[in-house]
Image (tube, coloured by chain):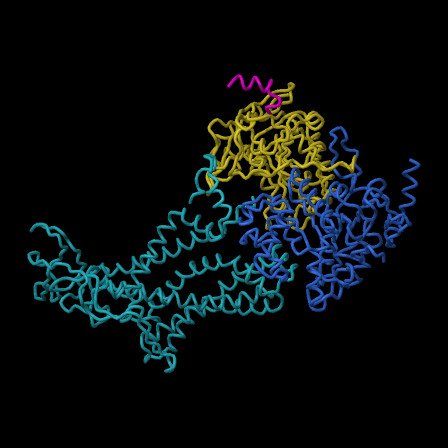
Chain colours: A blue, B yellow, C cyan
Amino acid sequence: MSSETLISAKDLTVGYNVGKGFFDRTVLKAVNEVSVEIKRGSFFGLVGESGSGKTTFGRALLKAAPITGGAATFTDGQVSYNLATLAGDELKDYRKRAQLIFQDPYAALSPRMTVRDIIAEPLEVMKLTKTREETDARVREIAAKCRLNLEHLRRFPHAFSGGQRQRISIARALVSGPKFIVADESVAALDVSIQADVLNLLKQLQKDLGLTFLFISHDLSVVAHTCDHVAVMYLGRLVESAPTRQLFAAPRHPYTKALFSAIPSLDPDDRGSAQKLVGEIPSPLNQPSGCKFHTRCPNAIDKCRTIEPTLENPGDGHAVSCHRWRELLGAETTA
Amino acid sequence: MTSLIDVENLTLSFRTDEGLVTAVDDVSFSLGKGEVMGLVGESGSGKSVTAKALMQLNPGNAVYDPRSKITLHDEGREVDVLSLRKSAELKIVRGGAISMIFQEPMASFAPAITIGNQMVEQLQIHTGMTKAKAKEISIEMLDRVGISDPSKRFDQYVFELSGGMRQRAMIAMALSTNPKLLIADEPTTALDVTIQAQVIDLMKDLVNEFHMGIIFITHDLGVIAQTADKVCVMYLGRIVEEGPVREVIRNPKHPYTRGLIAALPRFDDLDAPLTPVPGDIPSPLERPTGCVFHTRCREIIGDVCKRDLPENRWVDPSHRVACHLHAKTPAQTEAVR
Amino acid sequence: MLWRRKATAGVDQAAKEAYFTASQGQLIWSRFSSNRTAMIAAWALVLMIFMGLFAPFLSPYDPTIAGRDEQYENGPPQIPKFWDENGFSWRPFIYATERERSMATNFRWVITENRDERLYMQFFTRDWDYKLFHLDYDLPGKAFDVDFALISSDIHLFGVQGGQIHLFGTDASGKDIFSRTLHAIWTSLAVGTLGVFISFVLALIIGGVAGYFGGWIDSVLQMITDAIRTVPSIPLFMALAAFMPDTWSSETRFFFISIILGLIGWPTLARRIRTHLLTERTQEYVLAAELSGAKPGHIIRRHLLPSFTSYIIVDLMISFPYMVRSETALSFIGLGLKDPVNSLGALMQNVSKADVLLNYQWYFIPVIFFIALVLAFVFVGDGLRDAADPYSDTKK
């Protein structure tokens, strides 16, 4: 493990017991043996469709979803926590260091508290400040960083638009001075004209406060613009992981390629060139054998239906989990 | 191209606890037969309210300005949509000549009735055909929208289908009565990108086959670029720009349209900084005076923007924009006052 | 409210700020106060509560048999006048009455007014002794007996000089129906309050535990709740009525009935609290608090309780008329409070005789008050329910 790794997950698995009766021990594996390393100060993107397990993975790293297999470690200076067994005082300390920014700026703020109280709540719960004055000073400091109007702290959330609410949500996540932030679809619910503003703010805060982000999104174009490293998930599995430029320049997994190609092009004359995937993501309760993607893969062969590929890392930092990626890469370059 | 529906000076407000809130302000457009129009705008732009007005689907606290006029040209008839009151007359615009599909397909199917029965019932109401005939057409339609094993799906309930299949079933139901106009309200927003691509493809095929007009409501300019012939860009209840899709996307005239396009993250240049439209969308309670966009405009040219509502100006025969930048000259506007 | 002015007319900054900084309570009040039906009902309700609260002061005569007017049995209402054929008077007056029974009247007592003899109304007269805010329960077991009064007095709002005034007439034993009605409102409200309070406490504990912890605890509690809901109420009431010994005083019966109503009324409320908790618990802002390391106590106090206090107030308001109605129904079918006690149900029981329908229609006056009371509660409850969720439409 390199010294600059902040979060390291090894074969992390999150399973839920969804059996209907006492003897029915059906387990839904929302996240299935996922290994990633998130470098300190990086903006790590996690991409996938609904049902891919990306949200569960993010929550597991925050101890908000149960880790049922594998290991995850958080290393920050002298502190090193094993997330699978974290509890008690150590968990309390970890809560200060890792926080979540939600997707829905409406559901994430209690409508019954003023903005000041919302942002101050983590400070009060974690007893990070001793006096009310100290709390107020800290709230104002972080609110200013998130470009909130300090005169609006007395207001209730109903006074704010989506973008402003998301900035309040960000301020609450940052007020305890965390090092690691999980941003779960944090701009998906925002209007396009506001989305860029919040993304820029996140980037700015990362630089100013030395934060590390796990940025979960379904939107490849947003990820391409914000993240340094991108991992793609499909049905609980990591299918591809690479530095952003490398991934976008030459995606290796057929699923990643299909995701790219499905993004509607802004060019009205570029219609119908997209490579379309057939079918839909299978239910996690009824997972296909072999490669999870073979039911929709245009390049699937018999081997894909029976043997599940492992994540290969050919040494250039661009890992992929596909039996045929080399072959397909060759075919594309010759074509 | 003969016109299918003409909307003139549509102005609509809602009575709320906080007073009268303007949702749509002086919107005019017309749509030809077989034409696909994109209606783009962000939350609060009034795009859905505008579309619902075409079917009189807005809630009871909606107040239409008397100047508003919506005319539907349906097989030689001219229907004044806003004057329809009786439910028998409203049938013409609700499911008859106009059908609508929604973002959330669950909302348009009754949960306890099979998909087939709902399609048959709708067909019987609007066409008066026999039950057997209606069933035959419904299954044919389900097949047409790419639902595998349609006769089995016919007897299923909507919760038994996956998200993409639900969307297809809703499209099948909307098209089975053979409407002249289809209103699609964010039909792909709740879908994953790979499914969205499938649904967009399907809709393009259906337009070619059925030649109905489509009003495609979305906030996603990429979806518009892929589907529409022409675009109306709405902001705070007003159409700020209208034109052919290539013109509007490649050569936008209104600062808002330019801002929207610049705010989109693009793949061709990953290093290009994202440029948001500055500021926030004003709350409906604080509607700006003058040009509605002046509070966020980067190209504001002075007091005229804050004071006067810009007139629609045709920059070429099919492309109009409501912005003082494109008035003859700002000075002339001043002189007129 | 200030911010209700037309938005387009240019809301001034202070009013806007008032709206933006308005708390939940203020938003609810602003909505509620703009609902005219609910406001009228609220005023009517307040008026009736005060009438009940100060019933002894407002009623000229003792509503029990001690205050009967032997000379005016089954007497019609007497309406004070300022003016008649004999001229105008600044003081309101009624006429003296006489009654006679003879062959000519079929041996019934017939009351006639003597229009020449005026009885003038007096205010702040002294009559029977009473106690305000009086608690006197003679419960089984000495230790539970309560006898407490805040004010003792014998001053009443009005009376007449040299006779008695019966605004709503009298009943068969000469008791003043006006005084009885006022006391009955109080009794019914008290039974309702006690019943609602008991069911509320039970519902809060049972529904709260089920909703917060979920899982098997929830399942077990739901089974119990459902079991209680399936108990048919009338046979249960009859069994309980049979159980109540005749030796119990009317106050004890009254107390007992309130407890029964409370014990039966909680499941609906408990279920609503549970459902609300279950949905509110999965809200993202609750998760946000959990991720800050907040303990269950903090989450319940800071997030969950405030999120449903408004619903609880509404639920209480709406369940109140059911309590009043149940008490009335019980008393009406003879299982609850019996005639000497003044409850709306007991008064309504008198109405069920054919003689009353034909000859003594003023017995119906308490029924009007009963309907007004229930309607007031229902309208206030509805108004509160509409106003209680000021955030319901902000998401659109």
Residue C4 lies, in percent from the top left, at 44, 42
Magenta-colored stretch includes residue B336: yes
Say left or right for C386 vs C287: left
Residue B320 lies, in percent from the top left, at 62, 23
| Looking at the image, residue B98 lies above or below residue C271 | above
> What secondary structure is the stretch in magenta mostly built from?
helix
> Which segment did they paint magenta?
B323-337
Asked whether residue B194 appears in the rendered view, the answer is no
Asked whether residue C215 appears in the rendered view, the answer is yes
Nearer to me, A120 or C350:
A120
- Which quarter of the picture shows residue A284? bottom right
- Which quarter of the picture shows residue A14? bottom right
| Looking at the image, residue A168 lies above or below residue A3 | above
Residue sitting farthest toward the bottom: C142
Magenta-colored stretch includes residue A145: no
Say left or right for B293 vs C21: right
| Looking at the image, residue A137 lies above or below residue B289 | below
Nearer to me, C63 or B167:
C63
Q: How many marks?
A: 0
Nearer to me, B202 or B304:
B304
Say left or right for A37 vs B140: right
Residue B90 lies, in percent from the top left, at 51, 34
Q: Quadrant of the C terminus of chain C?
A: top right
Nearer to me, C268 or A218:
A218
Q: Quadrant of the N terminus of chain C?
A: top left
Residue C16 lies, in percent from the top left, at 48, 42
- Which quarter of the picture shows residue A260? top right
| Looking at the image, residue B94 lies above or below residue C49 | above
Say left or right for C180 vs B172: left
